[in-house]
């Protein structure tokens, strides 16, 4: 899983996320399963970025991109935590700089 994101200094408390699974990952029901798993992993761990966004003056918008079909949920969850932790660090740096 990959994450493309943007931080917006003037949008306090904004946390928007989108989920993409391209056609190369399989048929529609397989892509939908991947996106459901990504959404659930984000829902479980969105507090990593939401807390900083609400307390600071910075907003987050990101797109999670599935890279491999058939990935089990625990691996998706680990990727999500890793990516959100990296965003969390960047948000802390941006908040401290402004």
Image (tube, helix red, strand yellow):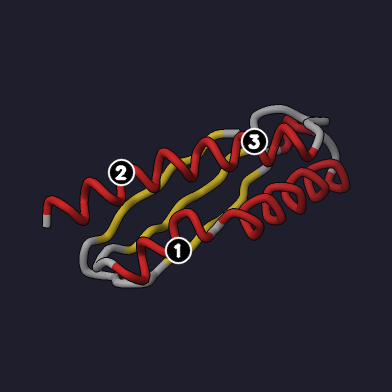
Q: Say which label, 1 or 3, has the lower sequence index.
A: 1
- Residue at 60% of width from left, 35% of height from top? 79
Query: Which residue in the protein does label 1 denote?
Result: 50
Q: Which residue is mark 2?
A: 90
Tell me the crowding category of disc 2: few under 14, some 14 to 19, or many 20 or more residues within 10 angstroms, Cα based: some
Q: Quadrant of residue 59?
A: bottom left
Nearest the camera: 88 or 26? Answer: 88
- CA–CA distance in space, label 2 to label 3: 19 Å
Q: Please give the residue where the numbered disc 3 appears in the rendered image.
A: 78
Q: Could you tell me how far apart the alpha carbons at marks 1 and 3 are, in whole angstroms?
A: 18 Å
Crowdedness near tag 1: few (<14), some (14–19) or many (≥20) residues, C-alpha within 10 Å: some
Total numbered badges shown on the rendered structure: 3
Q: Position of residue 70 (x, y in %)?
A: 83, 30
Which residue is depicted at the point 80% across and 50% down?
Answer: 32
Q: Is residue 66 above or below residue 5?
A: above
Distance from Cα at disc 1 to Cα at disc 2: 13 Å
For the N terminus, the image quarter is: top right
Q: Quadrant of the C terminus?
A: bottom left
């Amino acid at each position: 899983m990959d994450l493309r994101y943007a931080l917006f200094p003037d949008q306090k408390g904004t946390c928007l996320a989108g989920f993409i699974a391209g056609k190369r990952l399989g048929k529609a029901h397989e892509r939908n399963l991947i996106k459901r798993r990504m959404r659930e992993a984000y829902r479980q761990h969105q507090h990593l970025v939401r807390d900083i966004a609400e307390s600071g003056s910075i907003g987050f918008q990101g797109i999670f991109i599935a890279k491999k079909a058939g990935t089990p949920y625990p691996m998706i969850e680990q990727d999500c935590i890793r990516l959100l932790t990296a965003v969390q660090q960047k948000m802390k740096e941006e908040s401290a700089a402004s």
